[in-house]
Image: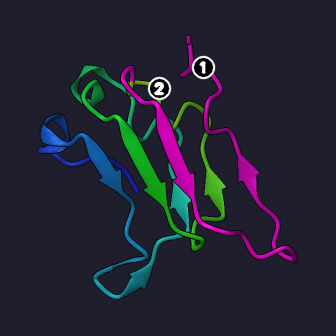
Amino acid sequence: VSKGPSIKNVSNLVIPVTYNEIPITKILESAFDGSDCYGIKSVSIPDTIKLVGVNAFGGCTALTNIDVYVAKPDETYETFYFEGSCNK
């Protein structure tokens, strides 16, 4: 998953379970960095996400809430939600 051109208008970001019927399993490294992501205040991530890349939400300076759905206990997850992106 990465940002689209209308991301600057988003305050509550919901990562979908699928896109064009394909399961979404990753949020790419630096996917939501950059000055156009400043308005994102909350992010909802479904349990289909298996990897969240380093600095994935680096540009989300207003981000105060990330809702992560219950993960399957037998799955392996690599998550770096806040590395380099949280200065609060």
Does residue 41 sit above or below 43 in this rendering? above
Residue 16 sits in quarter: bottom left
Which residue matches tag 1?
84
- Quadrant of the snapshot with the C terminus: top right
Rendered image: mark on residue 49:
none
Identify residue type, mark 2. Gly
Q: Nearer the viewer, residue 1 or 44?
A: 44
Label 2 and label 1: CA atoms lie apart by 6 Å
In the image, taking residue 88 as reference, residue 4 lies left or right, namely left
Name which residue lies at 38% across and 24% down. 59
Extreme bottom residue here?
21
Identify residue type, mark 1. Gly
Which residue matches tag 2?
58
- How crowded pointer 1 is (Cα within 10 Å; few <14, some 14-19, many 20+) is rated as some
Extreme top residue here?
87
Name which residue lies at 48% across and 39% down. 65
Please name the colour scheme applied to the rendered image: rainbow
Does residue 1 sit above or below 59 in this rendering? below
Name which residue lies at 46% across and 30% down. 64
Residue 78 in percent (x, y) is at 75, 52
Residue 60 in percent (x, y) is at 38, 27
Q: Is residue 37 magenta?
A: no
Q: Are marks 2 and 1 in contact (CB under 8 Å)?
A: yes
- Indicate the secondary structure of the residue bearing disc 1: loop
Residue 74 sits in quarter: bottom right
The residues colored magenta run 61-88
